[in-house]
């Protein structure tokens, strides 16, 4: 079956660094995505990893280890506007397309 | 349009009635996904269309739910004999062939009373 796990909630302080972990067990693998979702809004794309290693994009970085079925999203220099849910998603089979399965999301609260 | 468009944005219906939710994906995107999100919860996969291939319906929760995609573009999600537990936000997303991320519409908030 498909299983994607991430912590339900996290709290961090403005200006700090936070790491949100995601572990997955899927029938196939063709990429891992992180999305940000503010309350009442649609998810928006943050990052994509298909090979092992770290992808950096400004204040956000995402890491993937395929052998461990593990990823994390690193947020640096936290801002109040980073308070949102962060969704980990896996594309579950090869080829140019595949189904996109989401975890339940991690609700991040950034405090002053 | 520039993004994924969903209509209506809000729908209130009486228990037992049928509803149709529409998704207009980004032009040229071959993959289309439907998800359901209950308050404070994650995205529950419903159905996935990829080009002319048979859709992946494995996420549909019951036979009251169905979806079609006409001409490889617009998709309609139909819920028959709605129940109160169907109340949720229904999100549609599309992605391009050989593309990576999926782009989401703003969703339809369905309330069954």
Image: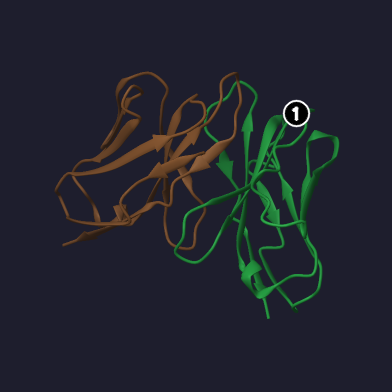
Chain colours: A brown, B green
SS of the residue at dot 1? loop
**In x, y percent, where is residue A105?**
40, 51
Residue for badge 1: B51
Query: In what quadrant of the picture does the C terminus of chain B appear?
Result: bottom right
- Please identify the quadrant where the N terminus of chain B is shown: top right
Visible residue check, residue B77: no
| In this picture, residue B32 sits left or right of residue A109 | right
Which residue is drawn at the image coordinates 21% and 49% (left, top)?
A78
Question: Which chain does the numbered disc 1 sit on?
Answer: B
Q: Quadrant of the rendered structure where residue A96 is? A: top right
Residue B5, position in %: x, y? Answer: 68, 50
Q: Is residue A56 visible?
A: yes
| Vertical position of residue B39 compared to residue A5: above or below | below
Relative height, residue A4 to residue B106 (above, below): above
Residue lying at 81% horizontally and 45% vertically, measured from the top left: B68
Residue at 34 percent across and 47 percent down: it is A6
Say whether residue B10 is left or right of residue A109: right
Residue B22's image quarter?
bottom right
Residue farthest toward the front in the current orientation of the protein: A1
Location of residue A49 (image quadrant): top left
Q: Residues within 10 Å of mark 1 (few under 14, many from 20)?
A: some
Q: Is residue B65 above or below residue A1?
A: below
Q: Position of residue B25 (x, y in %)?
A: 70, 41
Total numbered circles: 1
> What residue is at 60 percent from the left and 18 percent from the top?
A95
Residue closer to the observer: A101 or B98: A101
Foreground residue among A24 and B43: A24
């Amino acid at each position: 079956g498909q299983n994607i796990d991430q912590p339900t909630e996290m709290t961090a302080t403005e200006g700090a660094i936070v790491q949100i972990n995601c572990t997955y067990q899927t029938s196939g693998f063709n990429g891992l995505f992180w999305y940000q979702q503010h309350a009442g809004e649609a998810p928006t794309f943050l990052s994509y990893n298909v090979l092992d290693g770290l992808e950096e994009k400004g204040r956000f970085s995402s890491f993937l280890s395929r052998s461990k079925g593990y990823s994390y999203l690193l947020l640096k220099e936290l801002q109040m506007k980073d308070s949102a849910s962060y969704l980990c998603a896996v594309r579950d089979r090869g080829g140019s397309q595949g189904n996109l399965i989401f975890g339940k999301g991690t609700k991040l609260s950034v405090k002053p | 349009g520039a993004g994924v468009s969903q209509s209506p944005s809000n729908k209130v219906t009486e228990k037992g009635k049928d509803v149709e939710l529409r998704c207009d994906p980004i032009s040229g995107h071959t993959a289309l996904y439907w998800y359901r999100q209950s308050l404070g919860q994650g995205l529950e996969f419903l159905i996935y269309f990829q080009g002319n291939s048979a859709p992946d319906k494995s996420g549909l929760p019951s036979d009251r739910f169905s979806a079609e995609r006409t001409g490889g573009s617009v998709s309609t999600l139909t819920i028959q004999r709605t129940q109160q537990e169907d109340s949720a936000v229904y999100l549609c997303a599309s992605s391009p062939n050989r593309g990576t991320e999926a782009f989401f519409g703003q969703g339809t908030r369905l309330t069954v009373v």
